[in-house]
Amino acid sequence: MNDLNILSEAIRSGSEAAFEAFFRAEFRNVAFFVNRYVRDAVQAEDIAQESFLALWRTRDKLDPSRNIRNYLLTIARNRSLNYLRDVAKRRGGTPEGREAEVYARILQMPEVEQRIEALETEEMMANVYRSLPEKARNMFRMNRQEGMTYEEIAQQQGVRVKVVECNIVLALKAFRRAFY
């Protein structure tokens, strides 16, 4: 269980301290995300705050195995969409109304949902990477991020190529278990 899962479980159990810690850590990120679409910093902060309140009100429905940050961003996305639809309706054919319609359409695009889901995948990958033994983690990084061959890694680490190969296979198996 990772830190966000533990945090999610604590919030689900009603821990105000856990919720406050999550709020302090994520509020700016949520407000920034919302502001990309509503284009109003004050309104973005209001929507971010409303999103946190909605999260707290529905905390008993949280699934600790799911990414709480993504759940919150989905709430913020939906609240932003409602806000933009309301602006578009109230302002009709004005430039502000048309702009709100455009951003509402953007928020409904699958790419936005995919971006939110990608955050969860990145987090899962980071957790798997951190869980690897240090030797396997370093060799995997050298191979995948630095582009070094098994032979180059073996030379640099002073080990046989077979040791490098075993550590890379260990890392790949850990990733496969996490994602399949």
Image (spheres, rainbow, N blue to C red):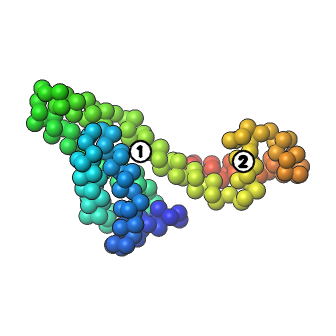
Task: Tell me what residue is drawn at x 12 percent, y 26 percent.
Answer: 93
Q: Residues within 10 Å of mark 1 (few under 14, many from 20)?
A: some
| Cα gap from disc 2 to disc 1, whole angstroms | 26 Å
Give the percent coordinates (x, y) of residue 109: 34, 33
The residue to which callout 2 is attached is 140
Q: Secondary structure at mark 1?
A: helix
The amino acid beneath tag 1 is Ile
Residue 74 seen anywhere in this rendered image of the structure: no
Task: Tell me what residue is drawn at x 43 percent, y 40 percent.
Answer: 115
Q: Nearer the viewer, residue 101 or 136?
A: 101
Q: Is residue 105 left or right of residue 134?
A: left
Give the percent coordinates (x, y) of residue 135: 76, 56
Q: Secondary structure at mark 2?
A: helix
- The dot on residue 79 is none
Task: Tell me what residue is drawn at x 44 percent, y 66 percent.
Answer: 7
Give the percent coordinates (x, y) of residue 139: 75, 49
Q: Is residue 76 left or right of residue 18?
A: left
Q: Residue furthest front?
A: 41
The residue to which callout 1 is attached is 116
The amino acid beneath tag 2 is Phe
